[in-house]
Amino acid sequence: ETALLLNVLPSSIAARLKESPDVIADRFESATILFADIVGSTPLFARLTPEEAVESLNLVFSEFDSLLESHGVEKVRTIGDAYMVVAGAPTSRADHAEAVCSLALAMVDTISSLRISSGEELEFRFGINSGPMVGGIIGTHRFHYDLWGDTVNVAARMESQGVPGRIHVTEATRSLLPTGWELEARGSVDVRGKGPMETFFLTSAPDQSTPLH
């Protein structure tokens, strides 16, 4: 039972759930969300058999999962062919923006070396945003941990209005990154539900010698 909880919930949330059946809902003043989504997945999966589609998703998401532990980032969930992670929730950490941005760069590197069974390359869009959010357990039987709020919605918009192969971040995230991170200004983007926003493409971390373009 404990192993199952740890497979579907963040460890701190699993421990709280075992101790008490009460509603779990928390507000986090500052955390960072990343969405990653496969570009052109509908026509891609139409060309694959169901087995090949599942095998392809399992291949890439397993690679992503292996990166999470070394970066101290939590997977929230997968939604079809999209992947959602967070740092700064449910366990707070001051460097949540750095952790997620470092993970995103590692994910891009990993994707570049992957080939699915059909021989095709997978291409992703990445969207990142930072700010306050609410997290909690949804459901009573097939429950899962999820996060909500404007910060989460904007992170999803960064992904959907991003560019294939690039890491699209908000000013809110950029402002949390210390000196040494390299970003390219995208300019003003009309973000659905928010209006014009100044956004950026993350290109490299302080310890990277070759920027991502």
Image: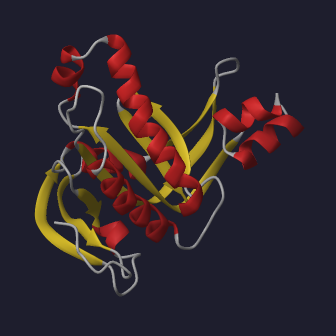
Is 143 drawn above or below residue 162 in the view shown? above
Give the camera-side residue of 165 and 158. 165
Q: Give me the residue at 34% from left, 44% from top.
A: 36
Give the camera-side residue of 185 and 78. 78
Q: Give me the residue at 82% from left, 34% from top.
A: 2
- Pinpoint residue 8: horizontal percent, then vertical percent: 65, 33
- Pinpoint residue 133: horizontal percent, then vertical percent: 51, 52
Is 36 drawn above or below residue 30 in the view shown? above
Q: Give me the residue at 37% from left, 46% from top.
A: 35
Q: Is residue 80 visible?
A: no
Residue furthest right in the image:
19
Give the number of marks.
Answer: 0
Residue 136: which quarter of the image? Answer: top right
Residue 4: which quarter of the image? Answer: top right
- Pinpoint residue 132: horizontal percent, then vertical percent: 49, 58
Quarter of the picture holding the C terminus: bottom left
Is 153 drawn above or below residue 139 in the view shown? below
- Pinpoint residue 116: horizontal percent, then vertical percent: 30, 32
Q: In screen coordinates, is 39 left or right of 172? A: left
Residue furthest bottom in the image:
179
- How is the rendered protein coloured? secondary structure
Q: In screen coordinates, is 191 left or right of 13? A: left
Q: Is residue 185 visible?
A: yes
Q: Give me the residue at 21% from left, 56% from top.
A: 166
Quarter of the picture holding the N terminus: top right
